[in-house]
Image: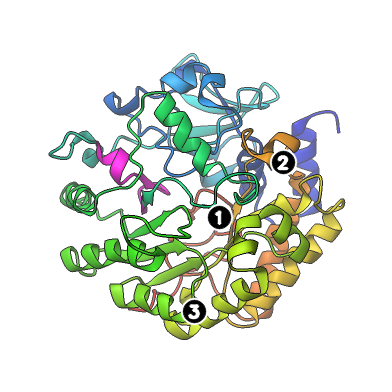
């Protein structure tokens, strides 16, 4: 269409029921954003909360390819407001791409803005350095390394196992760079703890609880790589669950406890519940049967797609359907060489999956695919999925929720344009602006 601006404006006109904020947000998430040196942070010594690389790289280049952005980290997230499109407050996770048509830079007065095709399209806000990031653990580790916060401080992200036991081309999910991200941070000499000690996690949470006087942090997520054998002598349910047990004993009721793990047998899921977890995310990644086999070979080998889905439904008996929220990676449906060739086909497939789960009262959510270059799908598809796919997915997602009478899932903050804080996709920005029901206790 000649320019990215023309493409974005065409989609806003064609899909007026999708918030304009979500159109820009999805484009930034799928294609990344460049940062002028004036917009970078001073890491943990500055006034801006820096990007923590909390599990994946979510970048369109390796650290050595990011230039100054690898030395002075960009902010964890940005907020877009105003500009010629009169954008409402929109929180966007930062995915760095030095060649993006979007650029964050300061003007002559030092005010940050987002520029597209050379034109300023929004004011940019950056997260202030939280007080709890200014304090270290007794062993000298930073809170940002052990218990970083995202979603504008709403969520504490506890990646307690930083690698995945699905390893190598025959097992790793083809869009996932968790193992590479671990390697690149270690190679760069950055602190990046592989298995986090439970006492370190508790100490970091104690610092957050002490200095987060506004109680902005509302939930924590326990997550990490898949465990096919054991870690520290524990199987997957016991490994992730024992952190939840320790947190809930030390801080009863302080945060909503969530766990991202594989789809496990019901007895293991019950252990999560017994340990104090309130929300379970057994991510199904991609709906199509063939694509699941091709893009998630380890999950297909160890569990299998049909059994994975059965376990998701079974887990609703333990947590209640509303508190089972599986994620999928939006966009990989169209990834070459095996993905759908048209947006129509991809949307039809993904909507079939949404209807399957939502008909059982389970509300999936999604992360917008970032084609990281060290992954097979990222190498083959550096542009990701078409922006139109992402916009139509938002439309289909909201319509399917309405068809089954569902509301926004718990544990994600408020829904609605101008209110949402979930930063790695626009699904919460695109839902009606109403308070979600509380998670089951």
Residue denoted by label 1 = 417
> Residue 339 placed where, x, y %?
80, 52
Binning the other alpha carbons within 10 Å of mark 1 as few (below 14), some (14 to 19) or many (20 upward) gives many
Query: Between tags 3 and 1, which lies in front?
Result: 3
Residue denoted by label 3 = 315
Q: CA distance from mark 2 to mark 1?
A: 24 Å
Give the mark nearest the N terminus, 3 or 1: 3
Residue at coordinates 55% horizontally, 77% vertically from top-left?
311
In which image quadrant can residue 375 be found? top right
Q: Is residue 146 left or right of residue 92?
A: left
Residue extent of the magenta highlight: 142-157
Residue denoted by label 2 = 384
Q: Is residue 410 left or right of residue 206?
A: right
Binning the other alpha carbons within 10 Å of mark 3 as few (below 14), some (14 to 19) or many (20 upward) gives many
> Residue 38 placed where, x, y %?
46, 17
Q: Residue furthest left?
A: 138
In which image quadrant can residue 273 be found? bottom left
Question: Is-magenta flag for residue 144?
Answer: yes
Report if the CB atoms under discs 3 and 1 are less than 8 Å apart: no
Q: On residue 406, which mark appears? A: none
Foreground: 405 or 160? Answer: 160
Question: Is-magenta flag for residue 152?
Answer: yes
Report if the CB atoms under discs 2 and 3 are less than 8 Å apart: no
């Amino acid at each position: 269409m000649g320019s990215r601006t023309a493409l974005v404006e065409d989609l806003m006109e064609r899909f007026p029921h999708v918030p304009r904020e979500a159109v820009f947000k999805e484009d930034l998430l799928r294609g990344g954003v460049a940062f002028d040196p004036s917009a970078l942070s001073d890491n943990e010594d500055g006034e801006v909360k820096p990007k923590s690389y909390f599990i994946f790289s979510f970048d369109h280049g390796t650290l050595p390819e990011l230039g100054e952005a690898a030395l002075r980290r960009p902010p964890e997230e940005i907020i877009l407001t105003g500009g010629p499109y009169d954008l409402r407050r929109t929180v966007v996770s930062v995915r760095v791409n030095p060649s993006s048509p979007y650029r964050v830079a300061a003007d002559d007065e030092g005010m940050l803005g987002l520029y597209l095709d050379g034109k300023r399209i929004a004011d940019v806000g950056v997260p202030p350095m939280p007080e709890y990031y200014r304090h270290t653990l007794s062993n000298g580790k930073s809170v940002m390394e052990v218990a970083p916060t995202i979603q504008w401080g709403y969520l504490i992200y506890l990646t307690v196992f930083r690698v995945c036991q699905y390893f190598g081309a025959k097992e790793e999910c083809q869009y996932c760079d968790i193992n590479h991200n671990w390697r690149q941070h270690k190679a760069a000499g950055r602190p990046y703890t592989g298995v986090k000690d439970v006492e370190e996690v508790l100490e970091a949470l104690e610092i957050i609880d002490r200095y987060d006087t506004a109680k902005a942090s509302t939930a924590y997520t326990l997550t990490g790589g898949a465990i096919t054998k054991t870690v520290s002598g524990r199987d997957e349910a016991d490994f992730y669950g024992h952190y939840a047990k320790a947190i809930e004993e030390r801080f009863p009721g302080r945060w909503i406890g969530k766990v991202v793990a594989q789809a496990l047998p019901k007895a293991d899921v019950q252990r999560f519940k017994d340990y104090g977890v309130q929300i379970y995310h057994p991510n199904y990644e991609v709906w199509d049967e063939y694509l699941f086999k091709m893009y998630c070979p380890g999950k297909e080998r160890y569990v299998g797609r049909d059994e994975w889905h059965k376990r998701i439904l079974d887990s609703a008996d333990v947590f209640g359907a509303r508190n089972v929220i599986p994620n999928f990676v939006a966009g990989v449906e169209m990834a070459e060489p095996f993905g759908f060739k048209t947006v129509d086909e991809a949307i039809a497939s993904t909507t079939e999956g949404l209807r399957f789960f939502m008909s059982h009262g389970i509300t999936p959510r999604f992360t917008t695919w970032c084609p990281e270059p060290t992954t097979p799908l990222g190498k083959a598809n550096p542009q990701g999925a078409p922006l139109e796919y992402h916009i139509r997915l938002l439309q289909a997602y909201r319509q399917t929720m309405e068809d089954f009478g569902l509301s926004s899932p718990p544990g994600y903050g408020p829904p609605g344009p101008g209110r949402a804080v979930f930063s790695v996709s626009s699904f919460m920005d695109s839902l009606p602006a109403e308070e979600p029901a509380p998670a089951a206790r």
